Image (cartoon, helix red, strand yellow):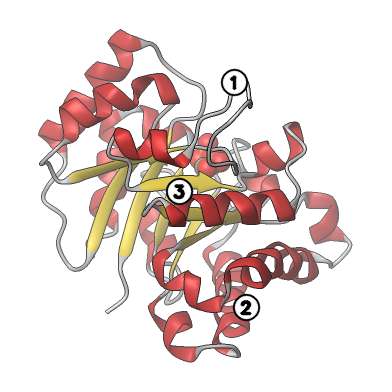
Amino acid sequence: MRNKLVAGNWKMHGNLQDNSALLEALKIGLPKPENNARYAVCVPFPYLASAQATLNGTQIEWGAQNLSQHEKGAYTGEVSAQMLNDFGCTYAIVGHSERRMLYGESSQIVAEKYVAAQRAGMIPILCVGETLEQRDSDTTEQVIDEQLKAVITLAGVDSLENAVIAYEPVWAIGTGKTATPQQAQDIHLFIRKGISAQNSEIAENLTILYGGSVKANNAMELFAMPDIDGGLIGGASLIADDFIAICKAIQN
Ligand code: 13P
């Protein structure tokens, strides 16, 4: 049976006090996951130690939002996969559209980061998705194909056995404009079919998340779609009650 996952992407938000309070509230408020569901928070690097201290042995996993593609060396300001390992990260997000667009990460670099995460035993959450311009010009599938191909070429299709894909249409991120459940389902199915052509078992077991303005009031209808296996949650993951409600929606 396919794993389901709700992961919070805190992005660059909060401070020591607020983030500690949020972790505590989640620890107390989140029910034990059932039915193959998992919950996670991807926190800014400086809060990984606190996530580890608070969440170790609980029902919540944690991870990072980025990592270096390099193992070690003279890369000022970068954080390696091994360092994330030291703080018990289960996940590392790679290829978020904010990294691709604001920090010039190409699909090749994203693929290298994906490999670096897996090499250190973490599960990469690989983000793919189109801009509004690309959707309007009917190139959504081409864009996603290119983003996936870079990873499959470098790491092989079998590597998806230990990975999660997040479909995040750029036009739906932080805009309050969610893809309709059918729009998201169509792309999730497109992704799964493309992978299935190479390895049907891997495709069938692959967890594919939807991300982009998932809120407590729309999570249930998104998660009800057959190829949507959970969510990558931005804004709503910063509010304990909202994130808890979204996590509960995946249990159904
Ligand atoms: P929002 O949920 O704030 O739209 O962000 C989605 C996202 O980018 C998660 O990675």
Q: Secondary structure at mark 2?
A: helix
Q: Which residue is mark 2?
A: 190
Q: Quadrant of residue 121?
A: bottom left
Q: Position of residue 72 (x, y in %)?
A: 54, 35
Q: Position of residue 238 (x, y in %)?
A: 38, 28
On screen, 113 above or below 151? above
Beta carbon at label 1 within 8 Å of ligand 1: no
Q: Quadrant of residue 98?
A: top right
Depth order, front residue of 215/108? 108
On screen, 160 above or below 215? below
Q: Is residue 126 visible?
A: no
Residue in view at x 17 percent, y 24 percent: 24
On screen, 91 above or below 197? above
Amino acid type of the residue tagged 3 in the rendering? Leu
Disc nearer the start of the sequence (3/2): 2
Q: Which residue is mark 3?
A: 232
Q: Secondary structure at mark 3?
A: strand
Beta carbon at label 3 within 8 Å of ligand 1: yes
